[in-house]
Amino acid sequence: MAGTVTGMVAYIKARIDRSTLKAGEQLPPTSALMKQFELSESGVYRGISLLKAEGYVHGKQGRGVFVSDRRKLISGPQRINSGITQQGETIDHKSSLRIPAPPDWVAEHLGPGECVNRVRTVNRDDLVLQASQSWVHLSVAEFVPEIEEPRALDPTWQAVYQDRSGLTVAVASKTVNARITSPEDREALRLDHDAAVLVMRSVYMTGNTVIGVGEGVYAPGHPIVIG
């Protein structure tokens, strides 16, 4: 695809998506991009502008253009009020079902007994960036019956619950750990080998009551920072 702006953009995006260009790395100078893609200076500038608009890169005054960290953890009020995806990403809801009881570690926060388990992935094109689950207390379904349907809520079930119930939802705790992928992780992330992954767990409360617990498993090669 040499010689076209779209070719340059597609090539750089693919390298960023596959982490052969990592967050914080500097793009080659304009002259090098002009030579590599057989473009004019204005063509390279147009391509960089497109990459900036999609959040792949950002400029630093007097220093150049750098790869953006597109896997920042979205947490706290930002996560509740703006959702878990970034530009160019989509949510694929796998299921949303009532289950008799959550895992033991979830029950320590949410309590024993029936709850709603929502399973989804966050994707960019054919890449699975994150595999997530949430366990939601049945009391939430009184205000947000849609949590039992395998579809996204705008922007999140927590925000819809706040709006309809008049109660504030807060992130009571958040932990980030690393682990070697389980068979379930590998299936969800479409991996064919063991790998180290980062895991974020969040507990959502209204007042003194836990109403939900979430876990996100981030694919290898997509670094995250605490936001």
Image: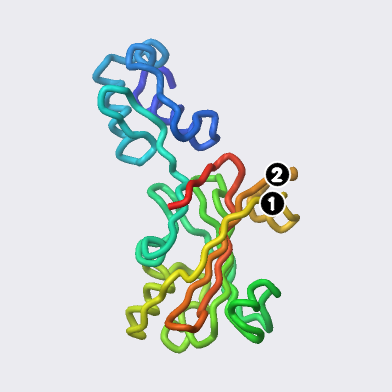
Give the side of residue 222 with respect to residue 56, left or right.
right
Frontmost of labels 1 and 2 is: 1
Give me the residue at 68% from left, 55% from top: 185
Q: Which of 65/36 is in front? A: 65
Quadrant in the picture for residue 10: top left
Residue 35: mark: none
Q: Position of residue 30 (x, y in %)?
A: 33, 16
Which residue type carries mark 2?
A: Ala
Secondary structure beneath dot 2 equals loop
Q: Which of 43/85 is in front? A: 85
Q: Which quarter shows the N terminus?
A: top left
The local crowd at label 2, few if under 14, some if 14 to 19, many if 20 or more residues have their Cα within 10 Å, is: some
The residue where tag 1 is placed is 179
Q: Which of 207/18 is in front? A: 207
Which residue type carries mark 1?
A: Arg
Q: Position of residue 37 (x, y in %)?
A: 39, 16
Q: Is 22 rendered above or below residue 209? A: above
Q: Is 186 rendered above or below residue 215? A: above
Give me the residue at 55% from left, 45% from top: 126
The local crowd at label 1, few if under 14, some if 14 to 19, many if 20 or more residues have their Cα within 10 Å, is: few
Give me the residue at 40% from left, 37% from top: 68
The residue where tag 2 is placed is 195
**What color scheme is it?**
rainbow
Give the side of residue 217 with respect to residue 47, left or right.
right
Give the side of residue 100 with respect to residue 84, left or right.
right
Q: Position of residue 178 (x, y in %)?
A: 65, 51
